[in-house]
Image (cartoon, helix red, strand yellow):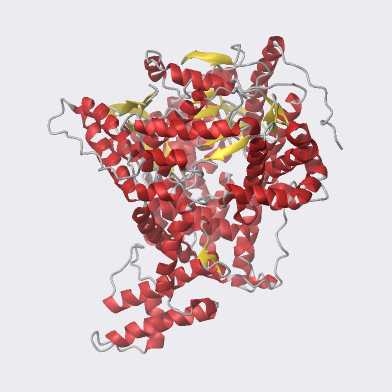
Amino acid sequence: MNKYVNIKRVLGTEEDQVKLESDMAQEGRDSYIKSTLRAVERGEEGNTAYGNRLVSGMTDELAAAITEWVEAPRKGPGRHHKALPYLKMLDARTAAYITLRMLVDSISKMTLMSATAIKIAEALSLEVAMRNMSQEDKILHKGILTCANKRSQYHRKQYTATYMAEQHGTALHEWDKDINTSVGTVLIELCVSKLGIIEVALELGKNKQEYTIKPTEACLEWIRKCNAKHLDIATIYQPMVVQPFPWQDPFTGGYLTNNVRPLTFVKTVNKTFLEKLETVEMPGVYEAVNKAQSTAWRINSEILDLLDNLIETESELGKLPPAKDKKPREVPEDFDTNEEAKKKWKAHASKVYKDNRSNKSKRLTLLSILQTAKKYACYEKIYFPHQLCFRGRVYSATNGSLSPQGPDYVKALLQFAEGEKLGTQEAADWLAVHVANVWAIDKIDKESFAARIAWTKANTEMLCRVAENPYDFRQWTDADKPFQAVVAAMEWKGYIENGLDHVSRIPVALDGSCSGLQHLGMALRCKETGKEVNLMPAEKPQDIYQTVIDKVLPELINIVGPGWEDLDYPGIIKHAENAMEEIYNKNKSKFRIKKPFAEWKEIAKKEKKKKDGTLAKRIAPEQEAYETYHRIIAAFAWLNFGYDKKTGKLSRKLAKNAVMTFAYGSEQYGFTEQLKVRVIKKAMDEGGSNETFDGIIAPVYSLIWDEGKYKALSASLLAKLLYKAVTGTVVKAAEGMKWLQEAAKVAAENGKPLHWQTPLGFLVEQNYWKTEDKRTQTSFLGGEKVRFRIQVETSECDKEKQASAIAPNFVHSLDATHLMMVVNKSEFKNFALIHDSFGTLPSQTQKLYENIKETFYKLYTAKDHFEDLKEQLTKRVKDVEGAHLPMTPIKGNLDPQEILNSPYCFG
């Protein structure tokens, strides 16, 4: 049961590391080969590296050949070629793309020419039919696209589209077999004569000679070279067993050998930028990254055993992905006669299959990470090379695999290699705070430090039982971060048994309070923002997410009206209809409404659409009734979903994503999309959408959101209210966001990308250029829009992107600067860093806590960063006539020294 807990550990050597780097390269090559072979087997070579390049590189040439063929003057019988009218139904680029995808999907195999011709033509005819449908029935067209594009393989998309059209009484027009053969043959012949990637040969089949298609030798040689190139750079980056080579310039650092693809200091393919960075003086940046990557880690053998045993028994404890596929519920008895039952079961089955695919991917990732952990479990110390993104944020090069920046179970697998005794009661208290933070039972992590310490002490018996036997004592599975909760329990047990002599290896994390708003609030001296994100002293942590959603609650109640808590699903429908009736009675005489209310309300409830799918105009009372009815129901869905009768509050989670992303440029539209995906879809996926044929009583919000239109209506309504609440809560931050975007628009007038230097000298460059994209519209091959070529950058910068991206990039460059300042000020050597989360051993946590606050204060008192940015951007447009940057926002009255006395700014 415990395979790794007593494993003998050794110090890694440079010789070990050289061998490991060679293995990383080989694993990368193996992975590339495996995925390529899988694509060949599935007939999806168009999705491989070489397949993508063949299709994108040949589309223009084939399109030109198709155009030439279609427009060529014809004499005699040839002027009435069967294929001609059909090839005119699609633009040449679309026809070329589809043809190449069909051919390249099986380029490695020899295929019958007749079958391939029909396959190409059927794909073209389906595309023509879908385009016609988009004009005749936009709603059905959208529904078919949505469902079909959930399938991964083209033949499944094709089948789904055909089936759905038939179910709606529409047949997707198919060309006759001889037409298919004629059209496909013309296109194949053009590929043979113009592209040189395939050839046609007469081969002896079972009973007769048949024409076959196979790749030319030149094409096969090109594929071999393309694969060889990708094999050379295929590397799966893994931890090191010796300290990474320190960064000295943008091209030198990280791994020891060129067995792996060399890292660059900034993760980018823009060599020009890296060469420019080479001339920049930024010693503080290099120092911070080198200190971060010099942190020695090791595998937590107890958690490795726990995970290994759970996987072996196919357990899902701790939110692990399921090991086995789930099966759909039994098909209802009236499946063939009850359309509603059939629809619901198919929706349920589709979700089950989708979840299975997602869980399989998660499980494979879990197994891969566990395999890496086992590989490194025998080493006393392991290290993670670090890189920066273009904004200066620090990332582990192994991110996505075993990494200190991974999800809960991955973080739990890692502990500091060089532990230290707690030594002081202060260190023990920080450990207690961390225990409460990762367990987060009943929102204890939102309480004062004293309350968190008290919670940990009060739960000592339970924590020790979990630490001793997490298999039988499973309270940890209810924790916010289950596997880190087990680690924390084990550490607390060590303290209970050994007191201050306990040698701890756990990273105690100190997290920012909505970091983006903290930086904007401090930069603009916004007292309102500062109060909400804990830049000012308070007896307990402020919760800006709750503050914002508290402002939304009365708005929702006002929409629905008093007595909403007593309403059920039929009740809210009746309540909304009563509101419609008031509008009806008020306007009946004025607008001479002749229909009785019972008939009128049913008309008013529905959207009025023209044939092309756009909304039709309607008389004022009808529109008012429509909006009122649906707004009441949408608002009630949120109240039913997120309201807690015990506290009288809406869930803070409804506001979390909106508030977090506001500081990075997200606005009302972004809030809407977040709510659709991260709240509504998630709630329905997790069981909100319960099938009534199974006898399950669905929650009211589920019954409402089951009607597709309410997902969008509900999201739009709440997004509007959230945006109003956020901008009314963090006023100066909102002004700062607006200034950044306006300044960026002006600064981009010189036609060059924006760039600025951070306080530590790092160069941030927004390399957003307008690109010449050659696009076409296809229904199923690659989604809705397919790019045929890699984007070719023009010499004109993308002003719109420059403006929309500056807020997140500027704020991230500041939080990256803060992180580096903290690391450089700290004299200890153990760091667990994730942007706005700082971790170290309990014995060093108090010093880290002080350093975080002191460097934050220093960062925002040494310089006015908005004025500094304005000065840097102004230099760029000094020669542009009429280009004047707007004045920076007027500062508020927040005293920056407040942060030095604020207990909860980080923690």
Please determine whether, in this image, residue 692 is positioned above or below residue 7. below
Residue 867 lies in quadrant: top left
Please determine whether, in this image, residue 699 is positioned above or below residue 476. below
- Image spot of residue 633 (x, y percent): 46, 72
Q: Please tell me which residue lies in front, 494 or 798.
A: 494
From the viewer's perspective, is 711 left or right of 211?
left
From the viewer's perspective, is 49 left or right of 401?
left
From the viewer's perspective, is 891 left or right of 811?
left
Q: Residue furthest top?
A: 15
Residue 86 seen in this snapshot: yes
**Quadrant location, the N terminus:** top right
Residue 412 lies in quadrant: top right
From the viewer's perspective, is 304 left or right of 864?
right
Q: Please tell me which residue lies in front, 345 or 650.
A: 650
Q: Please tell me which residue lies in front, 444 or 666.
A: 444
Numbered marks: total? 0
- Image spot of residue 278 (x, y percent): 40, 14
Q: Residue at x 58, y 36 (%)?
A: 44
Residue 75 seen in this snapshot: no
Q: Please tell me which residue lies in front, 713 or 469.
A: 469
